[in-house]
Amino acid sequence: MSEILLKSENLARSFGGLQAVAGVSLSLPAGQVTALVGPNGAGKTTTFNLITGNLRADSGTASIRGKPIMGLKPWQVARLGVARSFQDLRLFTHMTVRENVLAATETASWFWQPGGTRARARRQERAEAAMEATGLTALADARAVDLAYAERKFLSMARILAAEADIWLLDEPASGLDLASRIRFGQLLRDAQARGVAICLIEHNLDVVVELSNRIAFLDQGKVLAEGDPETILRDPALAAIYFGDRPQEAA
Amino acid sequence: MIAYLMNLATIVAIFGILAATLNFIIGFAGIFSVAHAVFFGLGAYAGAQVALLLVPDALLACLVGAAIAGGLSLCLALPALRVRGEYFVAASLGLQMMAATLFAEVKPLTGGIGGLVGIPRPTLLGVQIGVLPVAVAALALILFLTARLQRGAFGRTLQSIRDAESAAEALGKNVAAAKTLAVAFACAGAGIAGALFALHLSFVNVESFTMDQSVLVMAMVIIGGTGTLWGPIIGAVILLSLPAGLAFLPFIPATEVGAVQQIIYGLAMTLLMIFRPAGLVGDLSKGRSTA
Amino acid sequence: MLLLQLLLQGLQTGALYALTAAGFALIFGATRIFHFAHGTAFTLAGYVFLFGFTGGLPWWAAALCGIAVATLFGIAMERLVYRPIQRHEGSFFTVFVAAFGVAVVVQNLIGMLAGRGFASVDTELSRASEVLPEVFLAPVFWIAIGVAVALFAALSAFLTRHPAGVALRALAQNPDLIRTYGLSSNRLSVLAFALGSALAAPAAILTAMTSGLNEAIGHHAMLISIAATIVGGVGSLRGAALAGLMLGVAESLALAVVDTQWAEGVSFFVLFAFIIFRPSGIFGVVQTR
């Protein structure tokens, strides 16, 4: 069994009277792709926000390699090796593709980055490699706002690649991608997996889930109902009933 | 005539510093401050007091002006960390109005409405000099620094925060530190401009540090084009030559030149925003750099 | 007795602040435009009244002229400045700069035409008499309170009963909904600007009769409106009006301890404190970024 990179225990958070996340325990092992699956409003994105410090948890803990991360600010969590993508991407719209990716490699908020010219050369290499892997090299000087939909999604991935994190939290990274793009995206995930990155992704399309992940955590009403390999979970009629239930499936 | 041109050049250099530093936080960090004259004023009073009480050394006055303005820039950084957009503009407007009252009332430090008079001629290492060379050197230095910062990693950090703060944070950027630093840099620059202004005029009072002045500097940035390197300087040249140009028009009474100047740039701001929001220098095909 | 005097004075100022702020909040609520030139409508109304009255018009005719000019100004801003900018999806900053430019132009035009410095109208109504031992009140106090109460009653009746008023409130929630119901959001936003600007006019006229006007008073009116809207909680008209009233009272009560020139500092201080500690205002909902 591979090392658990990120672990959460009983994370809970309510908004007003609504219990959005009601005790989520999750383990993300290195080199595994875990899909968070569940109906709309199950608390998937909220779980991400609790882990990354964008929201404060009412109770529960989370740790990275055994180091507790509760109460840390988002940038502090990020510097421990967590990279996340957003459902609405949040690209740096008025910067070029290269600038977007370079920005992901420059974490120091000081007037200059530490490490001198050698570190700068390495950052540039990382950025070029990330653009190469996502097929954006030809578009390096285009502004993010001028990209097509799939290119934007890949730019969001390029930032994560360049950040060199070993825990990825991806919020619907494959939604709306055509088949060719999805194959390319799958390759990105498998390469990362081979390097020992722990990946967690939120995905609505179950075909994509099967295609990309090797573990599933099924969330409903803020709780993990089941965790295991895709075959077992998706064949469970009780879970299928909840998933397809009276709620129509939609990409929200 | 030479004296007149020298004077104009000095003033242009001083306002060039103001416009360039304001452009830095507006264009790159998305921090729309309407309180730049406050830090100009802090630097001016600090520089004037140094010259009056210690030595009229230009370098020392600039350093003290920069330190005080940069230090007190926390007053501007604090709301910038909490709110953005209209809210921040409102906060900086409030700061500007409050500071103008303070400048007029704290007589021991600012001389009140009457201001500080009889500031001695500046020296540099004991030798008496004019302000012009110092101001031009300071402008060159500030332009060089802003250009370096804008093109480098810090500029990218600020732009990324401007475009998507939460994403920048998720990539490990300490947003609060970066914003505070950017504001401190810009305000310290305004402080230098203030110290030079005090030494140049040998007299300062609150009139020069009111909202009208903040708006004038903002107009320079906007008319020139936000987010460009030379735009603010061009804006400063245009707006500062305006009164001289107006003085040649016989039908404008001398007392109304100031008002006519303000009407012209007020109108220019409105019309530019409607028809050419990127400013004169800004590249329209690239769209607006500070959306 | 000093405190009572200051409190009453504060209520009078506060009633006028509440009217001005409510106009701003109405415009912002319905159109999401931060109308930075709202103070200009205030200045225009005040000076038109002043000119009309000193030029020999009866007071009511001068007041009507003031209200009309403020309303027209609001409509002109919407049609000529804000709408073209929003058509090319200008950022908030574009809107702010354009509005501010207009404010600068009008301020200086008024300065050139009317002279700089304070100007006020002296009428019977603004002469104070002793109503209680050491407490002086001018009839204009009752007028200010009465006008504010009457206008707020009319406004809330309009917003809850009249179809256009209801639509105006709905516009703030969901512009698309309005379109599906076949109402024109364009026309509604003109209505919001007209109404909001008109609301500032009575306050300006009464200010001309009491503390007087100067050409830069628009900045003050604008800041008070913004402060009241933020303190009251953006989106809440009632909150803005209440906060305006409170700011007026606070400024006045502060005079018991500090000199006049610091009074308006009180409002900025409150604004600043709210922005740093509670940006959502008193009645606002805390939003996560």
Image (tube, rainbow, N blue to C red):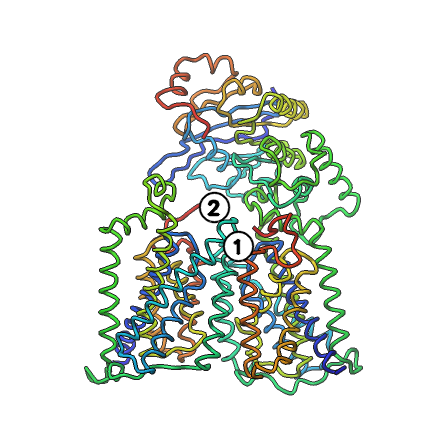
Q: Mark 1 points at which residue?
A: B81
Q: Quadrant of residue C155?
A: bottom left
- At mark 2, the secondary structure is loop
Please tell me how crowded label 2 is: few (under 14), some (14-19), or many (20+) other residues with Cα within 10 Å. Answer: few
Mark number, residue C289: 2
Q: In which quarter of the image is the C terminus of chain A?
A: top left
Residue type, mark 1 in image: Leu
Q: In which quarter of the image is the N terminus of chain A?
A: top right
Task: Identify which residue, A111 or C237, lies in the foreground.
Answer: C237
Residue A11 seen in the current view: yes
Left-right relation of B194 to A207:
right
Do the residues under discs 2 and 1 have CB atoms within 8 angstroms? no
Task: Identify which residue, A130 or C226, lies in the foreground.
Answer: C226
Residue type, mark 2 in image: Arg
Mark number, residue A83: none
Residue C256 seen in the current view: no
